[in-house]
Image (spheres, helix red, strand yellow):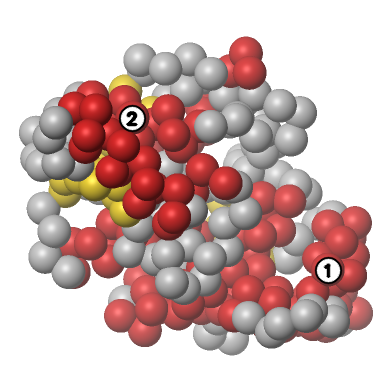
Amino acid sequence: MKKEVLLFTSGVDSFIAREFLIDSGHDIDCLYFNHGGRYTNHEVEKIKSLLYPVIIDTRLNLGDIEEDDAHIPNRNILFTTLALSLGYKKVWLGGSLSDRVGDNKSEVYQRYSELLTTVNEEYCRIDSPFYDCYKDDMVRWYTRRHPASRIDLLKDTFSCFNPLDEEKERDVYVQGLKGRYVTKECMNCPACFRKSAVLYSGDIFTMHENKKNVDHYERQFEKPLIQTSRTVGTMQYIGRWYEELDA
């Protein structure tokens, strides 16, 4: 067991976090907690298909407290606490300015790290390399660093609240080239919309299938109080979405 661990999911955040930490010289384990939620079987399937090792831990079962929108209260707090209890000294997350959940914030984990260090009388740290940037910035970093493998952001990641039972082929445009890929993501839920929007920052376009989600984010970001990478990137994706819809 290494001293540092990345709390890994099958999503874009942890995929890029692993690449960033390794590029930065960190020696890490990747750890996935199979918490029994509605989509974990699909995440496990995706993780097992990866070419690098990810530890799958089944100690937590949180499916009974999962809410209708797939949110599990205090999930990240539980994950980080258990990871430290397993013996790791530093726990990495994929948290960024794009996250809105309270238990994935820099100030929360700075204070929580201090608390656990006091309680256990041994230094520990919970952190993310991306607390000062948005997911769009993370995708741009990855696609600039690994331009030939940008399609991996699609085929090696999974972000969906309502996965399909059957695989479904979809169109994808990467750097202007049309191709096909196979996914079990529904392309109808908010998680699928957010993934499509952020991947567009890396010149990867996939067609979201639920106009209600498009309308929701368009209302939210059309006239923001402050322009950010997230608001700009989302509106650019929506503009391209309408172009493809009319084509």
The residue located at (60%, 30%) in the rendering is 73
Determine whether, in the image, residue 107 is placed left or right of residue 199.
left
Q: Position of residue 166 (x, y in %)?
A: 65, 34
Point out the tag, 1 or 2, that comes first from the N-terminus.
Answer: 2
Real-space Cα separation, disc 1 to disc 2, in angstroms: 34 Å
Query: Closer to us: mark 1 or mark 2?
Result: 2
Residues 51 and 14: in front is 14
Instruction: Inspect the image, locate mark 1, and give the three-letter code of the amino acid beneath it.
Output: Gln
Crowd around label 1: few <14 · some 14–19 · many ≥20 (10 Å): few
Residue extending furthest toward the front: 118
The residue located at (48%, 62%) in the rendering is 96
Q: Are marks 1 and 2 in contact (CB under 8 Å)?
A: no
Q: In this picture, is 217 found above or below 44?
A: below
Determine whether, in the image, residue 244 is placed left or right of residue 5.
right
SS of the residue at dot 2? helix
Crowd around label 2: few <14 · some 14–19 · many ≥20 (10 Å): some
Q: Quadrant of residue 222?
A: bottom right
- Tell me if I can see residue 26 in this picture: yes
Instruction: Inspect the image, locate mark 2, and give the three-letter code of the amino acid beneath it.
Output: Thr
* Residue tagged 1: 220
The residue located at (63%, 43%) in the rendering is 160
* Residue tagged 2: 81
Q: Position of residue 53 (x, y in %)?
A: 21, 40
Q: Quadrant of residue 39?
A: top right
Q: Which quadrant is the C terminus positioned in?
A: bottom right
Q: In this picture, is 193 found above or below 33?
A: below
